[in-house]
Amino acid sequence: MNALSSRGALADQAGAGPDTDIDTMPALELCALSKRYTLGGGLFKRGRALQAVSEVSLAIPRGQVMGLVGESGCGKSTLAKMLLGLATPSAGEVRVDGRPLGDAGQKALARHIQPIFQDPYSSLNPRKRVAAIVELPLRVHGIGTPRERAQRVAETLDLVGLPQRAAAQFPGQLSGGQRQRVAIARALIMRPDIVICDEPTSALDVSVQAQILNLLLDLKQEFGLTYLFISHDLAVVEHLVDRVAVMYLGRIVEEGSRKQIFAAPRHPYTQALLASALTPEPGLGVPDIGLGDVMPDPSNPPSGCAFHPRCPKAQALCRESRPTLTAETTGVSRAACHFASA
Amino acid sequence: MPLLDVQDLRVDLPVEAGTLHAVRGIDLSVERGEMLCLVGESGCGKSMTSLALMGLLPRRARLSAGRLDFDGESLTALSERRRGQLRGRRMAMIFQEPMTALNPAYTLGNQLCEAFLRHRLGNRRQARERAIELLERVGISAAAERLAQYPHQLSGGLRQRVMIAMALMCDPDLIIADEPTTALDVTIQAQILRLLRDLQQEMGTAVIFITHDLGVVARIADRVAVMYAGEVIETALTQALYANPSHPYTRGLLSCIPAPGKTPPGSRLQAIPGVVPSLVGEVEGCAFRNRCPLVREGEVDAARCEHTPELRRLTGDHQARCHYAEHRAATRVAQPELSP
Amino acid sequence: MTVSTSTTSRASRAPAAGGRARALSEVPLPPTAWSRVTRKVFGHRGLAIGLAIGLVCVGLAVLIALFAPLLAPHDPYFQDISNRMVPPVWHDKGSWTHVLGTDKLGRDYLSRLIYGTRISLTIGLVAALISGVIGTTLGVLAGYFGGRVDAFISYIITTRLAMPVVLVALALASLTGGSLTTVIVLLGLLLWDRFAVVSRSVTQQLRDAEYVYAARTLGCSLPYILVREVLPNIAGALIVVITLEMAHAILLEATLSFLGMGVQPPLPSWGLMVAEGKAYMFFQPWVIAIPGVALFVLVLAINLLGDGLRDLNAPGGRH
């Protein structure tokens, strides 16, 4: 079982200094992370380049929840894939506890970062029993004897609120909420530090969503987990997170604490997102958020500020130069806008 | 006289294990120019209801209704041909996935004009003019050029706008919109909803809007019908429903979603434990009793819940299908627990 | 208008995800013509009935093949020139000594038919297995890796599809000389295209299944992912292809033998029996009708079995 608690694996391989203080370090740090894809290439033909993620820098403090919001195609899923080792960054690096991941290897990475995916209908192999699905991480990493592993699976199922009889069942015999619990059990059985939640409740009914959100909060408390919580549901994000990053067309356009973002959003896109979140308050009607709905083509992004074609505040400057994310100052969020409200 | 008057609508589907009672006797009425929201979770029968109203049920489904009147005319008595004339001309539908609802092999112009021409509302030129006018009305620029485009050339939001224009082509009395914005991003959703609401009020079209999103319902509905396990369990004017939800399920749904400013961040959300009962075979008694907090906490006489409750009138337009809709716990406005 | 197309809109599950999940959890082959017919005729039990018929017939064929020496009333190779072309028992001149009569060399037809089962089943099974291994490997690799690997393998598949199987098999058989082994190897090397096409397209969908992502994030090795995560989920589709290709191989063997380039006399292959009987077609039609019917029944039964297995095998279960 010693492998479960090894935090040194990455450090040894990356050769980082031994004296870095873990407590003040962000658990997860993204440094100018970029990902470029090539689309439509064939055996003999060159494809177009698609910049899915551009120079994203983020730091998630230990034990906190970072919300990542943005619309489809904004690059948030690509970002998640890079953190999980499913895609190699074109540039930049990811640091766990201050140490670059570099080529630490997928297994070393897996001990620190685990995913919970969006669709519990696709995230569990329909041909495997729940026990085998949850046990897989331990088997792959050669942890424990079969007896110990079975014991561990039983504990973990209990932890996520599944009855023991679920172990012998196939995913097809479970409800959506139960499946998502299985996925959570699989993510947590290795006791990772960081969990990447990619829209973990958007495929679930609201009554089930609440159960899963409660479970995620409980587990975070119990194990001091750090979450990157990707979602498009702002009500859920506001409920769950400590910090929020807003992405638009591959870039972070605003980042700050929950309070900063939800009480005083500075970027026009964040403002529009918040305005378009429809809370269950009758009589308010549907707000006019004043954006065009022409989504720009990510493989041919607009010049200057990528948001300018939809932005109600856009001016000539926005077409010409791209605003950079302002530095962190006390009390205000970082925003990438020439005309960010103060 | 309401535009649409439905009583005791039932839809049964034969499945391997027996008969699935997808819709179990619902009563609905829609007034002219009204926006009625049907809200419920997956499998509650809301989509089946919409298909039944449009006459688009799968062939193996069996439909029965005490009354199914559209503008004073019984739909069940109509021939398939007459029904087809009604559909598209006076009733139109907007689907969740515009990409699957639009035929990728035809231009937008073709598809927009099809129903107009089929129902002989005018000639080709008039159809084209109306199409352009409506595309502009739903906020699509360069409408005349768009007519020659194919669905895949448009973004999701634009496609849904085209779908709305298409539904409006024949100036229908009733539009049934089945989760029309679920597949869209939030900013696009807000714009489409606003458009739909504006057009509906401007043209006086009645809309049955089907959704699972209580936030959307609150913002656009005139009246709400909450569905659970194939039944309407509560219906009221929007304000009344949110201010005073009377069925324990409605209260549960409302307290499940975190409300900014009311639910303290990071606090536990109220959840509805348990699962929806299987609708295969006969369902006896209140379908919600196995998950009902009133029953679980012993606040009410559970024996009474073994008897199927009727949809009862509480006040004015407010009806609920619960024996204990007036229970003291029920009269409290639903609030999530405020303890951390 | 809006109404004329799809009515498959589904309720509140997340849009794209829900659709994809359903597509993945079901094997993306439509029910074949036969299962549709059986379902039309027998309703939901049609599947079980089709499966039962297939199972019984194929089971019988396997038993017959295994116990051929016990079942055959005569030696299939024993020639009795004095008893040539004896008609079967239902014929006026038939006798119970030779239930299905004898052929032009006086060999007992029933015995030859029984031993022929061995040849047909061996060829079907071994050829389908060889081609299954080749095709599935190529298809899974192409589907999983995509990009250049896919482009290259697709090129091979297209090349293979462009070859007329019978002509190529004939040409090769005439070069190497026909024999049972040659036929099996030839067919095994030629019939993998459908395996490759099917496994490639299914794998393409599975590649982006989140459970494959989950296995990758855990650091599972590539062979583990392909064999343990992907393969079981394409098995349902492959079972159908295996049965189709078994039937295909059996028919092709018959064709090659009929054309003289397949199994060589005196082996009792059904195709060879048809070929040898073709001269007598007009006056002793049973000489070709009997092996013909045997071929037809076996091929049909294998197809029914494949259909049934595929449906039983669909995950999420029919229970």
Image: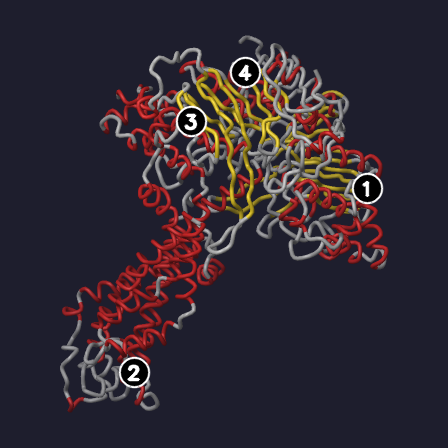
Crowd around label 4: few <14 · some 14–19 · many ≥20 (10 Å): many
Q: How is the image coloured?
A: secondary structure
**Is residue B195 left or right of B283 when viewed as pictured?**
right
Q: Can you tell which mark lies on residue C275?
A: 2
- Residue B108 showing in the rendered view: yes
Q: Residue furthest top?
A: B339
Quarter of image, res C159? bottom left
For the residues beneath circles 2 and 4, the answer to whether they share a chain is no
SS at badge 1: helix
User: At label 3, which amino acid type do we have?
Assistant: Ile
SS at badge 3: helix
List x then y, in percent, for residue A58: 52, 22
| Residue of label 1 | B137
For the residues beneath circles 1 and 2, the answer to whether they share a chain is no
List x then y, in percent, for residue B195: 77, 36
Quarter of image, res A320? top right
Whether residues under marks 1 and 2 lie with C-beta atoms below 8 angstroms apart, the answer is: no
Crowd around label 3: few <14 · some 14–19 · many ≥20 (10 Å): many
User: At label 4, which amino acid type do we have?
Assistant: Asp
Q: Nearer the viewer, mark 1 or mark 2?
A: 1
| Residue of label 3 | A184
Disc with the residue nearer the chain's start (4 vs 3): 3
SS at badge 2: helix
Q: Can you tell which mark lies on residue A242?
A: 4
In this view of the protein, which residue sits in the foreground, B92 or C137?
C137
* Distance in Å between CA atoms under marks 2 and 4: 81 Å
Which quadrant, please, contains the N terminus of chain B?
A: top right
Q: Is residue B31 above or below residue C52?
A: above
In this view of the protein, which residue sits in the foreground, C26 or A341?
A341
